[in-house]
Image (tube, helix red, strand yellow):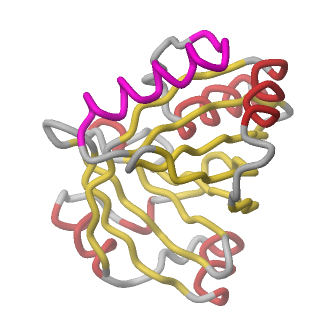
Amino acid sequence: MSTNIEIEVKTLITKKEYEKVLEYFKDIKKEEIDQTNYYIDTKDSELRRHEISLRIRKLNGFVMTLKTPLSEGLLEKSQLISEHEFNEFISKNIFPHGAISEFIERLYIDPTLLVPQAELNTIRISIPYEGCILAIDKNTYAGKTDFELEMEGSSLDKARVLLEELCEKIGVKFTENRVSKQRRALIAHNKLKA
């Protein structure tokens, strides 16, 4: 299992602004990936009550990641799982064993109660930017599409300043977005079910 601290600042943008950002970076070397996140919780949101998010990301394999808040950023614990473990969880609700399931059990949450709640696909373009990483995301979930810029850095202040300055330079409105992809996907998914 790997552990990482994630520090990022985000802003939602319109499709027109997204196209403007892509145009601005058209001549810059960038990496594009297509990934799908499966967001997980109990039916009565026990993880969310503990301010924990859990996902399985499908991208050249499968990685399960649990995130907990820190005073600045999020602590991420990640565990590789096999395609077989992923399929067993999605189709039969057999939660993969390992450090993450052990952590969840220490919170007195039964991992067998965890279920996939929402799915979100992201086409992400990543660009190194001023010692940070800029992610330009197109997200699709529950019949919706949104666009987001994320600046990941060594401190919230640095990431915020760089993202604000970049948005101003390109002519994109910056409004810090504190609603995670997971939360947006869950809200949209629950509206579909209602």
Q: Looking at the figure, which quarter contains the N terminus?
A: bottom left
Question: Going by the image, does 120 lie left or right of 165?
Answer: right
- Which of the 4 image quarters holds residue 50? top left
| Residue drawn at x 44%, y 55% as measured from the top left | 54
Look at the picture and state if 170 lies above or below 75. above
What x and y, as percent, mark residue 161? Answer: 36, 23
In this view, 62 is above or below 131:
below
Query: Horizontal placement of 53 versus 189: left or right?
Result: left
- Which span is picked out in magenta? 155-173
Residue 102 magenta-highlighted:
no
Relative side of 52 to 23, left or right: left
Give 154 or 84, whichever is nearer the viewer. Answer: 154
* Residue at figure coordinates x 59%, y 18% from the top left: 169
Q: Main secondary structure of the magenta part?
A: helix
Which image quarter: residue 38?
bottom right
Quarter of the figure that contains the C terminus: top right
**Residue 174, horizontal then vertical, whole percent:** 53, 13
Residue that appears at 71% across and 30% down: 147
| Depth check, front residue: 115 or 167 | 167
